[in-house]
Image: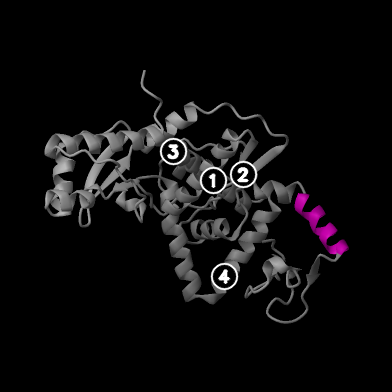
Amino acid sequence: MSAPLSIATIRAGIEAALADTTERLWGVRPERVVLERPPSLALGDLASPAAFDLAKTLKKAPRAIAAELAGAAQLPDGVREMRVEGGGYLNFFLDRGRLVAAMLAGSPPLPACPGKVIVEHTNINPNKAAHIGHLRNAVLGDVLGRTLSFLGRSVEIQNYLDDTGVQVADVVVGLTRLKGVTSEDDVRRAIAGGPLPDGSRHPKGLAYLCWDVYADIARVYEDDADAVEWRVQALHAIEAGDNPTARIAEVLSEAIVSAHLATMGRLGISYDLLPRESDILRRHFWSRAFELLKESGAVVLETEGRHKGCWVLRLTESPEFAGMDETDKILVRSNGTAT
């Protein structure tokens, strides 16, 4: 019965393969086959200078010897590829998937750890379809969560939904000011595959169309400074809830979150909890916390300077934030909306 696949068995297999092939080709069996770690993963997982060691005996160039070895040697179990690199190194690329699976299969189950770990990741603004950067963040978070679970931790995966923020407000402004949307029913028709009131649609659905809407309204802001007031009005309406603007934002956000979840689901990424910023505001979690922050003196109202009128959390005296260009965190903007 062969030994389970491991780094040790792979190294032994490479050493035996090179020694056997050298003896078969030239009648010389090396006393020792050296294996090293290449300077970068792009060059493989292991490398051998065996051809350099044989060059003097065989009176051949190391690269020519390496090429003959690579052509005649059988790949050991656990090695997916052998290449000749540089002046004559033999570089080996391992079958990492099989190796990791074998290592995990042979590991005893780890004892459960007390308590719960919350891993929050992805956190895409629910105002348009996901892009590759969002996928990267989701994959990193998913790997961290799975790793902690494997180590015996009780893990809860959260994806915080900023459904009342500036990005959602901007798309709502774009839909209502540029696309003719007047109610959540217009948004629902677009979700079902129909056009927006101005006739626009996207073959991949509303989430992708919102990329264009987001870009369009940004250009309007650039050209007309007064139009930024539309954003402020939308933010206030969305935070207040129970009004046409807030209902448009809610239907839009839920549809785009569904699109995000479908995208992540294709990668096998899922979540245990989807906290919504709108719930934090409308269930008064934030208002209660804000009052506690003011009572304790943790936040202050700026009366001058560029943050005049904002409630800020002063971090200047905190060593963790020393050296940062901006050490004060704005919690409430001067227009009264929360960040």
| Disc sitting over residue 267 in the figure | 3
Q: Residue at x 12, y 40 (%)?
A: 26
Q: Which residue is mark 2?
A: 119
Is 155 above or below relative to 59? Answer: above
Quarter of the figure with residue 228: bottom right
State which tag comes first along the sequence, 1 or 3.
Answer: 1
Helix, strand or loop at disc 1? helix
State which tag comes first along the sequence, 2 or 3.
Answer: 2
Is-magenta flag for residue 250?
A: no
Helix, strand or loop at disc 2? strand
Q: Which residue is mark 4?
A: 228
Residue type highlighted by circle 3: Leu
Q: Position of residue 308 (x, y in %)?
A: 73, 77
Q: Position of residue 260 (x, y in %)?
A: 49, 43
Pointers 2 and 1 in contact (C-beta within 8 Å): yes
Left or right, 295 with reference to 235? right
Helix, strand or loop at disc 4? helix
Q: Position of residue 140 (x, y in %)?
A: 50, 47
Pointers 2 and 3 in contact (C-beta within 8 Å): no
Helix, strand or loop at disc 3? loop
Pointers 3 and 4 in contact (C-beta within 8 Å): no
